[in-house]
Amino acid sequence: MSWVSKTLSSTLGKKLIMALTGLFLILFLIGHVSGNTLLFKNDGGEAFNIYAKFMTTNPAVKLLSYITYISVLAHVVYSIILTKSNKTARPIGYAISKSETNSAWSSRNMGVLGTIVLIFIVIHLQGFWYKMHWGNLPMVEYNGEQYKDLFAIVQFAFQQEWLVALYVLSMVFLGFHLSHGFSSAFQTLGLNHVKYSPAIKKIGLAFSIIVPALFASMPLYIYFMY
Amino acid sequence: MNLTLKIWRQKNNSDKGGFKEYKIGGISKDMSFLEMLDVLNEELSEKGEDPVHFDHDCREGICGMCSLYINGKPHGPQQTTTCQLHMRSFNDGETITIEPWRAKAFPVMKDLVVDRSAFDRIIQAGGYVSVNTGGVPDANEIPIPKTLADQAMDAAQCIGCGACVAACKNASAMLFTSAKISQLALLPQGQVERKRRAEQMVAQMDAEGFGACTNTGACEAECPKSISITNIARMNREYFTAVVSSNNL
Ligand code: SF4
Ligand code: FES
């Protein structure tokens, strides 16, 4: 075994993959949430549709999107591998365990939270991403150029109460996942220091509230405004 | 105090084991937890029953031999070793559940006794330093900054009890291993084997079948010696630096 594969198959190596892919996905969330704020622009979806076309055709964005797919996949696969080996590390459990006295609920339930987020991602991709790429979308014209009217799809989708509720609820779970994942990734990378760790903790907490809240406000906005 | 004890009894490593209930009376609040178990064992011996086996040695909180998962927490309700736990932490009439450490790498030998030699093998893999032979070196010959000495001493507080493994939902030994790697990596004396130590101790930790840390922080909250998870971050740094820079292909 080469030193690279040996390292990546060690517990620390697998944790490193979880941390790096997790951090990349955090960056992705920043990009995704900033772009989508165009939904709030009161222009009948023009800015959003132009942005959507750019995001699906620009080669640099394409490359980033492939890294995102790989990151999601690796994050999921390695979480399964780690969860399995962590379960075998304790074949017989305790009759009584007061783990709530020593650790945060979200930190102990990252697998459950992540699974919920993953299910959400599948539903979300199927609803918008798939339609944008391969669906039969109505077209609109801005300044003589043709654009797919993704905004119309978004508008239509979020007229349905159940879907809005599903999105808002999923964002709550994403928030809990991030509330542990953000600072945990830095700890795994070995970045723990009296000088900046308190800041990482605070930023992580703020991130896990603000970003999911912004995402959740989008379906709510569409539902109430249109 | 009158108590009901629910204790894990297991004849040997291959026995399935199970809980057994014991009623015990006349326990003083000032007794230590292990003294309470001594009273129980005396009663059991008088009745000709097999006493409850549990690990202990110094009973001063320094050797790390005592274990016991008491009422859902390693070393019981206080952040101390089981031998330093006193009956005043419990209420009269309470039911106390006592279990062994649970981890694949810590097999139960009998009742509450588990085999923690996995820790010894992690130490053997790299928890040592090279020293010069010859005359006795002068004290304080090597200057060490006070801050570093303090950090190394904090890490060296680890008594190898295994409560971190017991508390961790993944039965991970990273708090222990990181404390041992840190105490030597921080000091000038530990530089010679620094990279090899990180690589080999982590490899041994994995080979023993401990789980992978998910940074819940349960270990540091339960550690009787308050070993901090900043040591785990240091171990990760030591390990990642070692694998990309050592000559060990
Ligand atoms: S780190 Fe703490 S809990 Fe773990 S073995 Fe050392 S003293 Fe015990
Ligand atoms: S018996 Fe030595 S630390 Fe408890």
Image: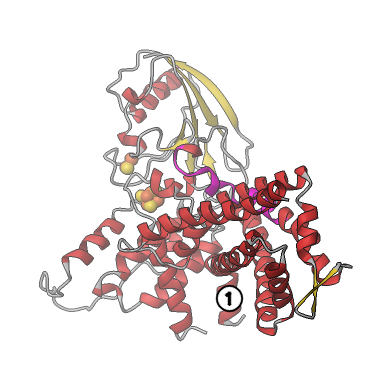
Q: Residue at x 30, y 18 (%)?
A: B28
Q: Is residue A111 magenta?
A: yes
Give residue A95's position: percent from left, percent from top.
Answer: 57, 33
Q: Is residue A148 magenta?
A: no
Horizontal side of B182 relative to A102 (left or right) equals left
Q: Main secondary structure of the magenta part?
A: helix
Horizontal side of A31 relative to B173 (left or right) equals right
Horizontal side of A158 relative to B212 (left or right) equals right
| Type of colouring | secondary structure
Q: Quadrant of residue B238?
A: bottom left
Give residue B185's position: percent from left, percent from top.
Answer: 32, 70
Q: Which residue is mark 1?
A: A6
Q: Quadrant of residue A85?
A: bottom right
Chain hosting mark 1: A
- Label 1's element? helix
Looking at numbered disc 1 in the image, what kind of residue is underneath it?
Lys
In the displayed orientation, state which residue is furthest to the right: A136
Residue B185's place in the image compared with B8, above or below, is below
Give residue B62's position: percent from left, percent from top.
Answer: 28, 46
The answer to whether residue B115 is visible is no
The span shown in magenta is A101-118
Horizontal side of B57 relative to B93 (left or right) equals left
The answer to whether residue B231 is visible is yes
Front-most of residues B110 and A135: A135
Q: Residue at x 72, y 58 (%)?
A: A121
Give residue B190's position: percent from left, percent from top.
Answer: 29, 73
